[in-house]
Amino acid sequence: MNLFDIAGQFSVMGNCLDVKPFGNGHINDTYAVTCASEGGVRRYILQKLNSRVFPHPTALMNNFEAVCAYLRPIVKSEGGDADRECLRIIPTVNGAAYYVDKQGEVWRMTQLIENTDAYLIAENRGMFEDAGRAFGLFIKRLEGFDASTLVEVIPDFHNTVKRYENLEKAVAEDKMSRAAGVSDLIEFARARKDKTGIIVQALEKGEIPLRVTHNDTKLNNVLIDTATKKAVCVIDLDTVMPGSLLYDFGDAIRVGCSTAEEDEKDLSKVHFDRENFVAFTRGFMRGLGDSITQKERELLPVGAILMTFECGMRFLTDYLEGDVYFKIAYPEHNLVRCRTQFKMVEELEKALPFMRETVQKVYTESK
Ligand code: ADP
Ligand code: GN1
Ligand code: MG
C-alpha cells in the first residue's frame, strides 16, 4: 500500500495531493498530507507508530483521545482556540482512531497545526521561556484528570533505577561486542548509580505527587507560532502517563539548556546555558502557578541532572543492544548522543548551586 492509499483510509477533506516526510522525531514516521477540496486546501499529519516502542496501539490511542477530549473544553473556557491549541484526531473512514495496514503497521492522523514550527534549539530565550509556560500549563490543566484511567504505555519510562539496570544488562550481554570501546561511559554511569533512585523514592514515599505528565518535553514537542514565536500546542502525546513534573522539567532542560544539538560530535560545543535555565524555570513555574509543591521545587535541579543522565544511559543501552530503539542516521549515532548527554550531566552537576539559587529566586519573584 502506498502512502496515498493509507492517507485515503482517513476522513480527510477532499483528495490527497501530496504526502511527504515531516519533522524529525526519533520514534514514529511522520508525514504531512496535503488535501484539496472545493473548500480549499487542508494539511494533516499522518504517522506510522513505531510498533516496537508502542506495541499496544489501542491503549495508546485511548490515552491520546482522552487527554485531548479533557483539554479542549479547558482551553475554550480559558478563551483559547482549541483547534490550534489542542491536537485533533482524524478518524478513519470507518470511525476508528487508527488504521492497521496489511503488514500490521499502525497509522494515525491528526490535523496539522498551520503556521507553526518545531525547533531543535530555541531561537531565543523568550521562545524557551514560553515553551516552559506551555509545558507547565499542560501539567496544571491535567491536574483534575484521573491518572488511574491512563494506561502506562511504556512501563517505568522514567524509572531511572530501572534504566540503570537495563544498561548493566546490556553491558553484561554485550550483544554487539561494543562494551570494551565505551568503558569510559560505562564507568561514568556506574559512578552515579547511587543517584538514580532520588525521584523514584520521593514518589514512593509520597514526598512528591504522582501527576499526569507529558514525559517527552523536548523543545520540538511544542509547536511555536511562526509569527509571534509563542508556544501554541504541546504535541507528541504518546507518552502522557502518570509521572512526576520533575520528568517534564528535567527533560526540557536537558535539551533546551544545551548550547549544542543532542547529536553534536564536538563536545567542546556542549555547555549549560544559564540564561536559558532562568528563562525556562520562569516560564514553567508561571504555567504551573500554585500547583507546584515545595518539595517538587526543591528537586527541580536534581530532575534536570537525572533526566539528562537517564537519556544518556538510554542512548548507551541502545548502542550496546545494536540500535534497536532510537532511529539512527549512522552507526555511531547513539554513541554520539550518549556523549553529549553525559557532557551535559557534568555541566549540570557543576551548575547545581546556580540552579538551586535560580529556582528560589524565580519563586520569590513570583510571590
Ligand atoms: P515523534 O514521536 O517521532 O517525535 P511527533 O509526534 O513528535 O513524533 O512528530 C514529529 C514532528 O512532526 C514534530 O516534532 C513536529 O515537527 C511535527 N508535528 C507533529 N504533529 C504535528 C501537528 N499536529 N502539526 C504540525 N506539526 C506536527
Ligand atoms: C524520543 O519521540 P521523540 O523523538 O520526541 C524518546 C524520548 C527521548 C528522546 C531523545 C517514546 O523522543 O524519550 O528523550 O527521543 N521518546 C520515546 O531525543 O522513547
Ligand atoms: Mg516528538
Image: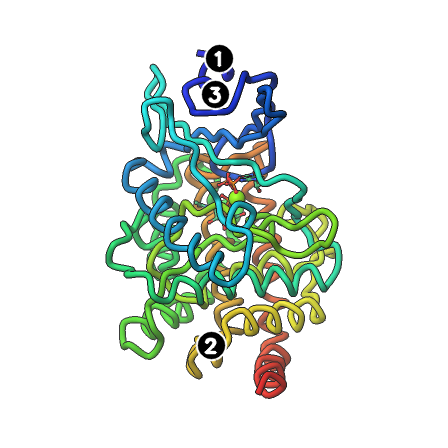
Q: Tell me where residue 18 appears, x and y as whole percent.
A: 61, 19
Please rate how many residues cluster around mark 3, counting C-alpha atoms within 10 Å: few if below 14, some from 14 to 19, many from 20. many
Badge 1 vs badge 2, beta-carbon distance below 8 Å: no
Tell me the mark number nearer the camera, choosing from 1 and 3.
3
The N terminus, quarter of image: top left
Callout 3: helix, strand or loop?
helix
Looking at the image, which residue sits at the far top?
1
Please rate how many residues cluster around mark 2, counting C-alpha atoms within 10 Å: few if below 14, some from 14 to 19, many from 20. some
Task: Residue 325: name its quadrant.
Answer: top left
Work out whether mark 1 precedes mark 2 in sequence or the reverse, and give the earlier one: 1
* Residue 299 numbered mark, or none: 2
Quickly name the residue at label 3: 7
Q: Tell me where residue 182 appears, x and y as whole percent.
A: 53, 48
Badge 2 vs badge 3, beta-carbon distance below 8 Å: no
Work out whether mark 2 precedes mark 3 in sequence or the reverse, and give the earlier one: 3
Task: Residue 214: name its quadrant.
Answer: bottom left
Residue labelled 3 has its Cβ within 8 Å of some atom of ligand 1: no
Q: Tell me where residue 354 appears, x and y as whole percent.
A: 64, 80
Q: CA distance from mark 2 to mark 3?
A: 45 Å
Q: Amino acid at mark 2?
A: Leu
Q: CA distance from mark 1 to mark 2?
A: 49 Å
Query: Which is nearer the eye, 181 or 103?
Result: 103
Callout 1: helix, strand or loop?
loop
Work out whether mark 1 precedes mark 3 in sequence or the reverse, and give the earlier one: 1
Tell me the mark number nearer the camera, choosing from 2 and 3.
3
Callout 2: helix, strand or loop?
helix
* Above-or-below relation of 285 to 321: below
Give me the residue at 33% from left, 48% from top: 66
Q: Amino acid at mark 3?
A: Ala
